[in-house]
Image: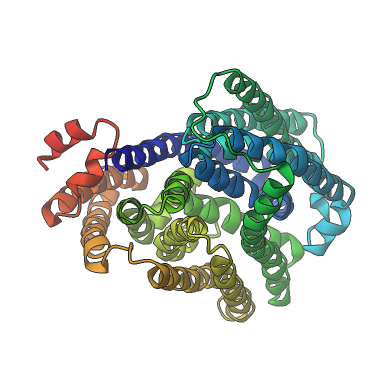
C-alpha cells in the first residue's frame, strides 16, 4: 500500500514538474510568436505554420510512438526490478530509431518544394528545408526522454523543453529580425524564424546525451538480473510504438490535409491565395496557438500517468490503477474546464490583448474552440490510459473516425460558414474521439470515476466562474478599456473558480495530498 502511494505521489509530482515546464515553455512560445507575428505578418506566419505542420507530420510518422513505447517498457521492467533490461531497452531504441528520423529528415529536406505545393503554399519551401533536420534530432530526444520518463524522472524532459523554447525565442526571432532588416523576401524571413526551432532541438540533444551519460555512470540496484535480448525488445518496442504512431499519424495527416482543404475551400469561395493564406495564418497562429495552451498542462498529466499505470498493470495492482486513473481524470477536468469556459466567454478580448485588433476576429475562432478544450484534454489522458492497458489500437480507431469527421466537416462547413467552419469541425472531431475513448476505458476497466463526482462539480464551478468573468469584463471595459478589464476578469475568475471548487466539494483531500507540499495545501484549503 505504501509503495502504491509513493507511485501515485511520483505521478502527481512528476506531472507538476512537467506542467510547470510546459506552462513556462508556452509563455516563452507566446513571447516568441507575438512579436514574430508583428514582424512577419499574417502571410509570413502562414508560411511559418505550413512548414511547422509539414515538419510535425514527418515527426509523427517517424517518432510519435517512440517515447510512449520506451516509457511504457522501461516502467514495466523497472517495476519488476529488471534495471539492466530497462537500460537495454533504451540502448536498443537508440540504435534503431534515430536512423529512421534521419531518413525522414532527408525526405522533408529534398521534398520541400513538392510538399509545399501539395498544401497550396509553395512559398513555404525554404522554411520547410530549415526545419527538416529537427526530425532526426527529435528521434534522439524521444529515446532519452522516454527512458527517463519510464524511470519516473521528469526533470530531463522538462529541462530539455525549456532549452528548446529559449533557443527558439532567442535565435528564431533574432534570425528572423536580422533577415527582415537585410530586406530579404518574406519566405526567407519565415525560414530564418523556423531555423531557431532546429537549433533548439540540436541543443536539447546535446543536453540529454550529457544527462544520459551521467546517469549511466551511477550504480544501480538490480533485483532481477533477467534481461531479454535486444531483438526481442525491438520487436516489442515496435508492437507498442506502431499503433501509437498510426494514431498520431492519423491526426497529423488530418491536420496536413486540413491545411490544404482550408486553403483550397477558401479559394473556391472566392478568396485569393494571399487572402486565404492570411485567413489561415490568423486562425492557426492566433486561435490555434491559444487553443493548444491548456493542452500543455494536460500533457504533463498524460506523460506522467503512463509509466505509473504501466508499472501497476505489470504488477496487476488494480487498486493503484483505479486510484491513479481517478486522480488523473479529476485533475484533468479541474484544469481543462475553466480554460474552455474562459475562452468561450472572453475569447475575443484575450486575442485582442495578446495580438492586437485585427480585421479577422481570431477571438471568435477561439470562442468556438473553447468547447473543444476539455474534449481534447480527455482524449490526451484516455489515450495514455489505453496505451498503459495494452489497448493502443483503440485510440487509433477513434482518431480515424474523428479525422474523417473533421475533414468532412471542413469540406461542408467552410462552404457554408467560411473559415468559421474549421473550428466547428475541430469541436466535432474531438467530441467523437473522446466519446469513443471513454467508452473503451469503461469497457476494459472500472477505474473511471463517476461523472457526478469528476465532471459535475468542476463544470458547475467553471460555468459560475465564466458568468462572473463575463459580467466583470462587460462592466469594467467601458471605464478601464478592454485590456485592463480582461486582465481584471481573468484574475477574478481564478479566485472565483477556486472558491466555487471549495464550496462544491470538488477538491479531494487524497488528491491534494499527492501534490508537492500536499499536507500544507490541505491545511490552507481546510480539507
Q: Position of residue 406 (x, y in %)?
A: 58, 73
The quadrant of the picture occupied by the N terminus is top left
Task: Work out whether 166 lies above or below 513.
Answer: above
Residue 14: name its quadrant.
Answer: top left
Please count the marks in the image: 0
Q: Position of residue 500 (x, y in %)?
A: 16, 53
429, 139: nearer the viewer: 139
Q: Position of residue 100 (x, y in %)?
A: 79, 46
- The answer to whether residue 159 is visible is yes
Q: Colour scheme of this structure image?
A: rainbow
Q: Is residue 119 left or right of residue 82?
A: right
- The answer to whether residue 419 is visible is no
122, 1: nearer the viewer: 1
Toward the front, the furthest residue is: 225
Task: Work out whether 91 lies above or below 410.
Answer: above
34, 249: nearer the viewer: 249
Residue visible at 74% across and 67% down in the picture: 272
312, 265: nearer the viewer: 312
The quadrant of the picture occupied by the C terminus is top left
Amino acid at each position: 500500500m505504501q509503495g502504491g502511494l509513493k507511485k501515485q505521489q511520483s505521478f502527481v509530482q512528476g506531472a507538476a514538474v512537467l506542467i510547470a515546464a510546459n506552462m513556462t515553455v508556452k509563455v516563452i512560445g507566446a513571447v516568441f510568436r507575438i512579436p514574430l507575428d508583428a514582424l512577419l505578418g499574417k502571410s509570413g506566419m502562414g508560411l511559418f505554420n505550413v512548414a511547422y505542420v509539414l515538419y510535425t507530420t514527418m515527426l509523427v510518422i517517424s517518432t510519435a510512438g517512440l517515447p510512449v513505447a520506451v516509457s511504457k517498457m522501461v516502467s514495466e521492467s523497472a517495476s519488476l526490478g529488471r534495471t539492466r533490461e530497462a537500460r537495454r531497452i533504451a540502448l536498443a531504441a537508440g540504435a534503431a530509431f534515430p536512423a529512421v528520423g534521419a531518413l525522414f529528415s532527408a525526405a522533408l529536406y529534398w521534398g520541400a518544394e513538392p510538399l509545399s505545393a501539395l498544401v497550396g503554399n509553395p512559398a513555404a519551401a525554404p522554411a520547410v528545408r530549415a526545419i527538416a533536420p529537427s526530425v532526426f534530432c527529435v528521434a534522439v530526444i524521444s529515446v532519452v526522454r522516454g527512458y527517463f520518463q519510464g524511470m519516473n524522472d521528469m526533470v530531463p524532459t522538462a529541462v530539455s523543453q525549456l532549452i528548446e523554447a529559449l533557443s527558439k525565442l532567442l535565435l528564431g526571432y533574432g534570425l528572423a529580425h536580422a533577415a527582415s532588416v537585410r530586406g530579404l523576401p518574406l519566405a526567407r524571413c519565415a525560414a530564418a524564424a523556423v531555423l531557431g526551432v532546429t537549433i533548439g532541438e540540436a541543443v536539447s540533444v546535446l543536453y540529454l546525451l550529457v544527462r544520459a551519460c551521467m546517469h549511466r555512470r551511477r550504480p544501480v540496484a538490480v533485483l532481477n538480473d533477467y534481461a531479454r535480448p535486444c531483438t526481442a525488445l525491438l520487436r516489442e518496442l515496435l508492437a507498442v510504438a506502431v499503433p501509437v504512431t498510426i494514431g498520431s499519424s492519423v491526426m497529423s495527416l488530418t491536420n496536413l490535409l486540413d491545411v490544404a482543404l482550408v486553403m483550397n475551400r477558401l479559394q473556391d469561395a472566392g478568396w485569393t491565395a494571399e487572402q486565404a493564406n492570411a485567413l489561415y495564418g490568423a486562425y492557426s497562429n492566433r486561435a490555434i496557438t491559444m487553443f493548444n495552451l491548456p493542452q500543455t498542462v494536460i500533457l504533463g498529466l498524460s506523460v506522467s500517468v503512463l509509466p505509473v499505470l504501466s508499472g501497476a498493470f505489470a504488477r496487476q495492482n488494480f487498486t493503484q490503477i483505479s486510484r491513479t486513473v481517478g486522480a488523473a481524470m479529476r485533475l484533468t477536468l479541474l484544469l481543462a474546464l475553466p480554460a474552455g469556459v474562459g475562452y468561450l466567454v472572453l475569447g475575443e478580448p484575450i486575442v485582442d490583448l495578446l495580438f492586437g485588433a485585427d480585421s479577422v476576429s481570431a477571438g471568435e475562432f477561439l470562442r468556438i474552440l473553447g468547447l473543444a478544450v476539455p474534449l481534447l484534454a480527455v482524449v490526451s489522458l484516455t489515450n495514455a490510459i489505453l496505451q498503459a492497458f495494452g489497448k493502443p489500437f483503440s485510440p487509433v480507431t477513434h482518431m480515424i473516425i474523428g479525422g474523417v469527421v473533421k475533414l468532412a466537416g471542413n469540406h461542408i462547413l467552410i462552404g457554408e460558414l467560411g473559415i468559421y467552419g474549421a473550428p466547428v469541425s475541430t469541436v466535432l472531431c474531438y467530441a467523437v474521439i473522446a466519446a469513443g475513448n471513454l467508452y473503451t476505458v469503461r469497457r476494459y476497466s472500472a477505474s473511471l470515476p463517476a461523472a457526478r463526482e469528476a465532471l459535475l462539480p468542476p463544470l458547475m464551478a467553471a460555468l459560475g466562474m465564466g458568468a462572473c468573468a463575463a459580467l466583470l469584463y462587460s462592466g469594467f471595459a467601458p471605464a478601464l478599456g478592454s485590456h485592463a478589464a480582461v486582465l481584471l476578469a481573468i484574475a477574478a475568475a481564478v479566485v472565483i473558480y477556486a472558491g466555487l471548487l471549495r464550496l462544491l466539494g470538488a477538491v479531494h483531500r487524497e488528491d491534494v495530498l499527492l501534490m508537492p507540499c500536499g499536507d500544507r495545501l490541505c491545511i490552507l484549503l481546510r480539507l
